[in-house]
Amino acid sequence: MKALIVGAGKLGYRLADALVDEGVEIVVVDKNDEVIENISNLIDVMTVKANALDFMVLKELDISSFDMILATTKNDEANVVLCSISKKLGCKFAVARVRDPEYLRHLSFMAKELDIDYIINPDFETAEVIEKYLLKKYLLMSDEFVGGKVKLVEFNVANDENFVGQKLMDLKGFDDLLVTAISRSGETIIPNGQSVLMKNDIILVGGDAHAIEQFDRDHSGVERTKSIEKVMIVGGGKVGFYLALLLNNANVEVTIIEKDMERCLFLKETLPDCTVIQGDGTNMNLLEEEMIHTFDGFVATTGIDEANLLNALVVKQMGVYKTVAKISRSNYNMILDRLVIDGVFNSNFITASKILRLIRGSGALSVNLMLGGDAEFTEMIINKGTLSTDKKIKDLDLPEGILIVALVRENEVIIPNGDSILQEGDHAVLFCTRDRLSDMKRIFQKDELANEALWKFWARKR
């Protein structure tokens, strides 16, 4: 597969980095010298310094030879035009990033009329993930697969004597659960039964939804498990706006703190049921005046990662049940494990995960980038003819870094062992480190299916 990425900002870089591991031939176009030099030094891709809106550039690149264009510039209109023109010039599949709230209700119409296959709004996607976490009636960060039948939670063992110093094989209450990975000071560790847990390790625990929910209640404190009824959002930008809209529709009382007066007026006009306060949300005196301790949830969504992390950290110490920070860079992966924050959501990882699902191939139902992009959880259907079909897991010789977390067969969740046989039609939840992606695809996909899902999606759009 051959892909053109236009716009090498944080999202463009994340996509290029992820797609290289997929074996995709990448060309990156950006008009900024410094950006092009940076991506050339860090990723093995072809780079072109140019303005892709000069359509002669697309012709010189022979856009008709590309399977996909990903338009991720900062300009929504430019992304839409680039995708539409590229399709007319023969590119097979087009994905555009569109962030402006004004376009939210018209994305399907725009895609259809302009022949764009997929329009993604990173800010709305991020807001949806945060809302989903806030509205869960338990505390631990989690993801879910196969319609919620299989769940995954992140748990900081802190100083818990039930975990610290214990071998995984000796942990009590883990008969129906699986520790898939350990994050230690930003480093990803693939454990085995002999692995010993250390203070402040983050463990990723997967299993049947009921077992995971019981684990959450046991280890986050059942007395703290409650519904979210009142949320404060600091930062009234796009993510903050979308999140307030979603929470408001879920009958949650929302207060937004935003510095810019003009933005405050926009928020008040478009979100009349929300309380909008003009001020500096990093000012603790202001938060105390607004009685932050009476809120169930707090979300920092400003454009400054450092401010969001610090804000969420401080507010957590003030007794708020759930605190969340939105970030867009991966600079802080080394310290996130040590921060007492309930949720940290990287908007670029969320967006890249959505796009990777399109590209991954037949049967891929979801892709969740985890551990700073070092690993992922993938939900896929076991297809007839793959190396994994009708085989015992122990006979697959899975390399270290690939783990089958759970199988769902006829609505039954199975935590597999070496003797479990994979059957056609099984939903498999897989854990895979970044360096084992090619092995995962070799074992669980047929070569000729690598682009089939994409082409079927494209054909339906026609």
Image: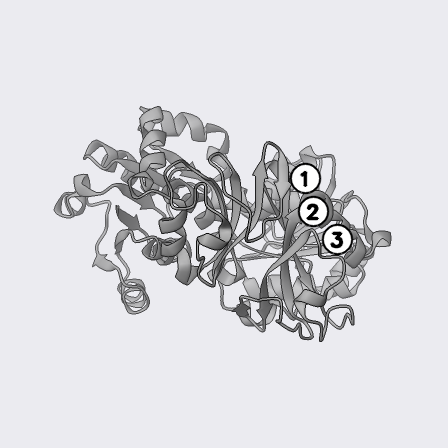
Residue furthest out toward the left: 60
Report the disc number at residue 377. none
> Which residue is under mark 3?
216
Name the residue carrying label 2. Answer: 134
Q: Is residue 117 left or right of residue 280?
A: left
Residue 64 visible in the shown view = yes
Residue 49: quadrant of the picture:
bottom left
Nearest-to-viewer mark from 2 and 3 = 3
- Residue 44: x, y in percent? 27, 63
Which amino acid lies under the numbered mark 1 shown in the image of this protein? Leu
Position of residue 305 in the picture relative to residue 220 (left or right): left
- Say what secondary structure mark 3 lies in: helix
Label 3 close to label 1 by CB (< 8 Å): no
The amino acid sitting under disc 2 is Leu
Disc 1 designates what residue? 247
Residue closer to the observer: 37 or 345 = 345
Percent of width and height locating residue 371: 53, 61
Q: Residue 462 vs residue 54: left or right?
A: right
Q: Residue 423, percent across and down?
A: 49, 38
Tell me, yes or no, whether the two marked residues, 1 and 2, touch with CB atoms within 8 Å.
Answer: yes
Q: Nearer the viewer, residue 427 or 267?
A: 427
Q: How many marks?
A: 3
Closer mark to the observer between disc 3 and disc 1: 3
Under circle 2, the secondary element is helix
Task: Give amino acid for label 3.
Answer: Asp
Residue 364 image-quadrant placement: top left
Q: Nearer the viewer, residue 144 or 282?
A: 144
Q: Position of residue 456 (x, y in %)?
A: 34, 30
Could you give the CA–CA distance between mark 3 and mark 1, rounded to whole angstroms? 23 Å
Q: Residues within 10 Å of mark 2 (few under 14, many from 20)?
A: many
Residue located at (41% from left, 44% from top) = 355
- Earlier in the chain: of badge 3 and badge 1, it is 3
